[in-house]
Amino acid sequence: MSEVKIAAETRTEFGKGAARRIRRESKVPAVVYGHGGDPVHITLPGHELQLALRTANVLLTLDIEGKTQLAIPKAVQRDAIKGFLEHVDLLLVKSGEKVNVEVYVHTEGDLAPGAFLLEHVLSTLTVEAEATHIPESVTVSIEGLEAGASILAKDIPLPEGTTLAIDEDAVVLQVLAAQAEEADDSAAESTEA
């Protein structure tokens, strides 16, 4: 888990025109909410925020007019073509507070010999973790799995202090037999006929 410090400015202008002016200055409009308080509209430096968001589940230390607050990204809007940041929603958190986040599922190892396919039914796993100790990802071994095997959410080892926030019997990965051989056999039969 990485923590990034970013200086933020409060903003009083809202709407498309104001947002466009902010983006022209290489900044990103954002909203900080949580803990029952009113949402705070802020402006963040675009380049620093872009670099921070490269890390999954980054913890941001916001300096808003001399007041320091911890926040995690909840929703990030990007331009569909150019990919630059358009708007970010941030959720306030406190040290020791539990939050629900999605972490990526990575695999290690090789499947059993043969023509098998690994299907990622879920590419992320929703977990509950302490806000200052959010894992970036979880890793599961697929070593030696054969066709028909599946890995459930409860089978994935989680870091200490992290618990599942989804159904523990949800299928995350499954190994399928390759279908190409059957298609080749049926094509050969149709040419013989």
Image (cartoon, grey):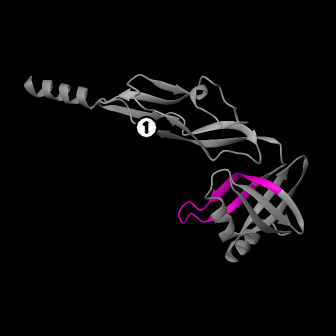
Which of the 4 image quarters holds residue 182?
top left
Quarter occupied by residue 125: top right
Question: Where 100 falls versus 168 (above or below)?
Answer: below
Residue at the outermost left position: 192
* Magenta stretch contains residue 88: yes
**On the rendered structure, is 99 left or right of 66?**
left
The foreground one among 156 and 86 is: 156
Compared to residue 12, the image places residue 80 above or below, namely: above
Question: Where residue 22 appears, x then y in whole percent?
Answer: 73, 73
Residue most extreme to the front: 160
Residue type at mark 1 is Gly
Q: Which residue is mark 1?
A: 109
Residue 37, relative to residue 172: is it above or below? below
Residue sitting at x 38%, y 32%: 111
Task: Read off the magenta span.
Answer: 70-89
The image quadrant of residue 126 is top right
User: Of helix, strand and loop, which one carries label 1?
Assistant: loop
* Relative image position of residue 29 (x, y in whole percent): 74, 65
Q: Magenta segment, principal secondary structure?
A: strand
Going by the picture, which residue comes out furthest to the bottom?
25
Q: Nearer the viewer, residue 160 or 64?
A: 160
Residue 18 is left or right of residue 149, and the answer is right
Q: Is residue 72 left or right of residue 139?
A: right
How far across and how far down the image is residue 54, in percent? Answer: 61, 59
- Give the residue displayed 43% in from the left and 37% down from the top: 109
The residue lying at 69 percent from left, 72 percent from top is 23
Quadrant housing the C terminus: top left
- Residue at left offset 8%, top offset 25%: 192
Mark 1 Cα-neighbour bin, 10 Å: few <14, some 14–19, many ≥20: few
Q: Position of residue 128 (x, y in %)?
A: 73, 37
